[in-house]
């Protein structure tokens, strides 16, 4: 079997964050009729750059055996600079190649990863501060947080995540940075929101605290200490990953497990956070850390340090599918991210098959490959570039 070319699909508008965030899929075609889909995710103005790289990389793939995922990964990684744009490009290619392998062998991808350890994947509702399910308005008040948390519980979710510092109480975007000093009033506002989520979920629900790497060490510690009484499951990106020692400073001063990894590219960038024992849960995004090939290696690396894996998933249908397959096959799986934007209908239409959560779980796809395809009705919403 040989690769004959690729088709690159780009959403005409940004479905997640209009004007800022577009989805980009790549379809790799073969001379035996099998094809595979991959996806990349770069927030901001990175999509055009990724698209140009995919056009360049696509030409080098023609004539290759799609089963040679390791050699293709090594070659593309070797000519990259290790930045999110270049890594995102070959991540999409890698995911598509695994999709082809599964289809050609008529097995789901998880079987190629050693087989599944679980039939269902536990999910959490992610970033409820953006609004869910009946509104897309950002949450500002404690009452809003209570309402959404209660709705999530009623829908079967056993855990939710929120960035409780994203929005100010007057309805605007918070101005938060690494040098922001959290006052007593600001901490009280955060604690009030977390308390409202706890009330909405009940005592048996789980809360994930998320800072999106927006705070410095002292503020991150202050927020954790103000909210840990509400039994926080884990604390995501309390500080930036630019300096692993900062994460260690936070971990040593709080009593909540730390999670991070969505901004890290490939296993070498994860190693310092595992070696200094600052991170108990790693969160690679398969679409910007090297695809399924590298995602499996990161999971194995984390297992050496007894760290769990909760993949970062905020993209479209192929992001979701790839993550579920890997999570089904690794022993140190923790939970799966179900982003509220992914669940919005205008975003969900891009996938042919729906894998909705039922009672807080998603079934592992049984179809060959990723078990996902581009929906016919979505093709008209995307621009197509073919490389043959």
Image (cartoon, rainbow, N blue to C red):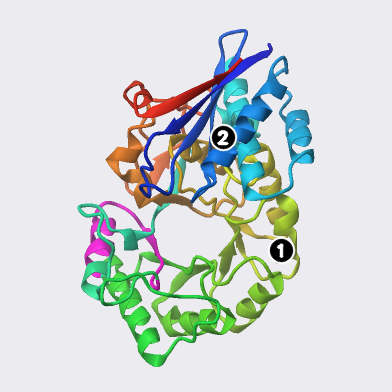
- Residue at the spot 34% in from the left edge and 37% down from the top edge: 348
Magenta residues (range): 146-165
Q: Could you tell me residue 289's position as x and y percent?
A: 64, 46
Residue carrying label 2: 51
What distance separates the C-alpha of mark 1 from that of mark 2? 33 Å
Q: Is residue 116 visible?
A: no
Q: What is the x, y in percent for residue 197? A: 31, 70
Image: 313 above or below 64: below
Front one among 349 and 203: 349
Q: Is residue 148 magenta?
A: yes
**Quarter of the image with the N terminus in it:** top right
Determine the residue located farthest toward the bottom in the rendered image: 184
- Quarter where residue 129 is shown: bottom left
Name the residue: 24% across, 52% down.
133
Tell me the SS state at disc 2. Answer: helix
Q: Are marks 1 and 2 in contact (CB under 8 Å)?
A: no
Q: Mark 1 sits on what residue?
A: 274
Closer to the camera in the image, 153 or 265: 265
């Amino acid at each position: 079997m040989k690769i004959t070319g690729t088709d690159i699909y780009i959403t005409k508008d940004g479905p997640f964050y209009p004007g800022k965030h577009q989805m980009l899929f790549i379809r790799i075609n073969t001379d035996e009729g099998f094809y595979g889909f991959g996806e990349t995710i770069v927030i901001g103005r990175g999509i055009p750059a990724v698209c140009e790289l995919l056009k360049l990389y696509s030409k080098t793939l023609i004539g290759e055996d799609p089963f040679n995922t390791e050699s293709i990964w090594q070659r593309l990684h070797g000519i990259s600079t290790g930045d999110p744009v270049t890594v995102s490009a070959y991540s999409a290619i890698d995911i598509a190649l695994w999709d082809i392998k599964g289809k050609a062998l008529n097995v789901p991808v998880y079987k190629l990863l050693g087989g599944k350890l679980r039939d269902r994947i536990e999910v959490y509702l992610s970033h409820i501060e953006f609004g869910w399910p009946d509104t897309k308005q950002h949450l500002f008040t404690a009452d809003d947080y209570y309402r959404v948390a209660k709705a999530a519980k009623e829908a079967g979710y056993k855990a939710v995540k929120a960035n409780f510092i994203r929005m100010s109480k007057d309805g605007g975007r918070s101005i938060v940075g690494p040098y922001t000093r959290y006052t007593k009033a600001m901490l009280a506002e955060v604690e009030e929101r977390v308390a409202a989520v706890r009330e909405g979920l009940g005592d048996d629900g789980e809360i994930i605290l998320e800072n999106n790497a927006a705070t410095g060490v002292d503020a991150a510690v202050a927020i954790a200490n103000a909210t840990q009484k509400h039994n926080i499951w884990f604390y995501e990106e309390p500080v930036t990953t630019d300096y692993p020692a900062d994460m260690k400073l936070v971990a040593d001063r709080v009593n909540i497990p730390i999670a991070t990894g969505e901004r890290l590219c490939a296993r070498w960038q994860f190693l310092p956070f595992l070696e200094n024992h600052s991170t108990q849960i790693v969160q690679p995004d398969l679409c910007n850390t090297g695809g399924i090939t590298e995602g499996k290696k990161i999971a194995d690396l984390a297992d050496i340090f007894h760290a769990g894996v909760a993949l970062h998933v905020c993209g479209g249908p192929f992001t979701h599918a790839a993550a579920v397959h890997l999570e089904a096959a690794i022993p140190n799986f923790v939970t799966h991210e179900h982003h509220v934007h992914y669940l919005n209908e205008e975003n969900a239409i891009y996938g042919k098959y729906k894998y909705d959560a039922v009672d807080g779980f998603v079934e592992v796809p049984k179809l060959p490959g990723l078990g996902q395809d581009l929906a016919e009705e979505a093709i008209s919403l995307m621009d197509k570039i073919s490389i043959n």
